[in-house]
Image: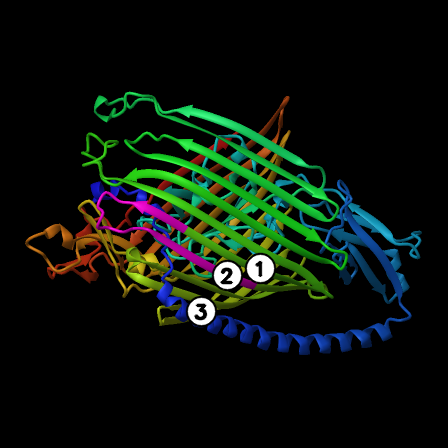
Amino acid sequence: MSKAAGIVPDVLKEVSGVHWACKRLGKLKRQMVNIVNSVFLIIYKFMARYIILLICTLILSAAQNSLLAQAIAIQGKVVNGKTQEPLIGAVVRLSNIGAITNEIGEFSLQIPDRKLLNQALIISYISFEESTVYLKGVDLTKVLLIALKPSENLLNQTLITAGRYEQSLKRMMVSTELIKPYLIQGRNTTMMDKLLDQIPSVNMVDGQINIRSGSGWTYGAGSRVMVLVDDMPFLTGDAGNVKWNFVPIENVKQVEVVKGASSVLYGSSALSGIVHFRTELTNDKPITRFSVFTGLFSEPKKSSLIWSKTIQKQYGATAFHTGKYKDLQFAVSGNYLRDEGYRMGENDHRLRLNGNLKWSTKNKMQYGLNLGMLFSDGASFLLWESYEKAYTILDSQITTTKSGNYYIDPYVNFYTGTFKHQLRGRVMYISNDISNPDPNINQDNSSNNLYAEYQVQRYLTGVKLNITGGLLSSFNQSNSPLYSGFQHSRNLAAFVQLDQTVTAKLNASAGARYEYFNMNGSEESKPVFRGSLNYELAKASFLRASCGQGYRFPSIAERYIQTSVGLLNVFPNTNLKSESGWNAEIGYKQGFVLKGLRGYFDFAYFYTQYQNMIDFNLGMWRAFDFNNPFKSYGFTSLNIGETKISGIDLSLNAEGTVGKFKLQSILGYTYTNPVMMNIDEVFATDSLGINYSFRSTRSDSSNVLKYRYKHLLKFDVM
């Protein structure tokens, strides 16, 4: 098993989509109409309740305004002290009353008692230093202009992923990592999966992302980590994996990593965490970056591994520019790579183009469009000639792949009173034209993913409560011999999350989600819940605790893939069940300042359980054929049973000035104990009647899950 796993096929990473079938277009259109009608019906019912609630709110507000007609009104505007841009959502407090700045940074505060004018006005905004304005002697007939200074404290860095709205790092209720651009730009990163291997608690297994040993190896089909680019899921529609060469590396402003089950906010695939890439748009001066690179592959130490008489090369270029014209912000970027590879016959030749547009109108609306295109041409092989000749092709079994991919993500943001609304859409198309050594095997594939999401948010200043809710719909389809013909899946969900500042030191969060999933008529639905706390023990000392549920529906590829390369087969499993689990953790974060350095230390203990975990297993899964026994032998996806993963997580982030040098560093250590709960439980029986348990698939009696690390240490300093 270990050697078979060691020859993981790069080609199957590219198996991620299927062609349209013309004769099924009529049926597909009818299905799409039914889905759209269902979504609009859900939105209509939701908006009906929302309109009634809004009318009641307006009536109460009118009554309140009449009572406060004689009160003193304070008008003001909060801006960024560095760029003079308005800050939306800044909190303004005076004693027990407060207000939130609107879309242009303005606020109005009604003062019912003149005695309150002897107190100070406190203005706070995430990632900015808190400001205090004493009202005594201030001319309240004029609009107050309040400029906040950006904070340099690492604990005040902002993240969006953990709560779907901006929060400071110190108030996080789950373990998170925030990666700044220096880790990307300070090295020659050609694909984003190489960067992720530098992040604490994260490692890659044959291109598949793994957080805290939550994933093993599943042949590039399915992901237990949700990957986002600017709030939008970035998993392919059929295989549920990530096209790492499609992520716009040159335009990533920061990477946010959330560790642990996050399905309440982000649905299926967020079973063991989230990785969120946030891109960059300028608010001030234009930014331009350009780089070229080249490199050589050295000869291996063993002469038996040398297959080429020429030196293999890698070279390419990246470019990025962002600017602003009146109310339009824009960014364009591109990446070109030519990689001749270090394994016989393998190469990678690609061009990627990306663009971002954001337009703010005078009526306080924001329109945006993100798009990307990728064209690639590469070759790879599956089986080595032998253990001693690992880089050499067995029997010239080379596979070439030509890909043409694109995505278009339109969105609009707007406000109605104190409500913030977001509408987002996605069309993603993935196409792979594959040339196989065996002309009888057709692995060409393409897939389509349609995604739409509505999110509404409101902050109640009186009770310091942030409410986030949303509806979403997703539709995936494929048609290819690779996935046994025409397959489709759809997903509908609704979620809500409450985040409250209970006291000045205590913050609490709770959320729920209901998910509906349908693949080829096989339906499944389930609710999931989460809750968490964050308590400030002392200055820059924070204690947190959280518990949340997660789940993952199987991808089309996991259930229906049927292919072979050489003598190795991959079989479908239409009875594959969804994975589910829960995660709990307790953590402590401590900020520090040491001479010219500032940063924070984080410690967490975590415990996770999974049910029906999916794993790839080698066996005789088809009736034995004496004429060709290899046709019956291969891999398939199986639910192997209940597992648990526990461990500790340590990280240290620091930056500052040492002498004349600016220092930035990140260090992380993760210990995990990933084990099978019952190693003798039979989870499958093959075509020869042989029972499969976890014990029978290992060469020893260990209960440790395969393809995991127990110890993981990462350190980077610049």
Badge number at residue 451:
2
What amino acid type is highlighted by mark number 2?
Answer: Tyr
Residue 78: where, in percent of width, then height? 79, 51
Residue denoted by label 1: 424
Q: Are marks 2 and 1 in contact (CB under 8 Å)?
A: yes
User: How far apart in space, not on screen, are marks 2 and 3 (Cα)?
Assistant: 16 Å
Q: Which residues are magenta?
A: 431-453
Vertical placement of residue 245 versus 665, above or below: below
Q: Quadrant of residue 70?
A: bottom right
User: How far apart in space, not on screen, are marks 3 and 1 (Cα)?
Assistant: 22 Å
- Seen from this angle, which residue lies furthest left? 626
Q: Residue at 86% across / 71% down in the picture?
A: 68
Q: Split into 4 quadrants, where in the image is the C terminus?
A: top right
| SS for dot 2 | strand
Q: Nearer the viewer, mark 3 or mark 1?
A: 3
Visible residue check, residue 460: no
What amino acid type is highlighted by mark number 1?
Answer: Arg
Residue 434 counted in the magenta span: yes
What amino acid type is highlighted by mark number 3?
Answer: Lys
Q: Residue at 48% across / 58% down in the picture?
A: 262
Residue denoted by label 3: 29
| SS for dot 1 | strand
User: How far apart in space, not on screen, are marks 2 and 1 (Cα)?
Assistant: 8 Å
Left or right side of 372 for 627: left
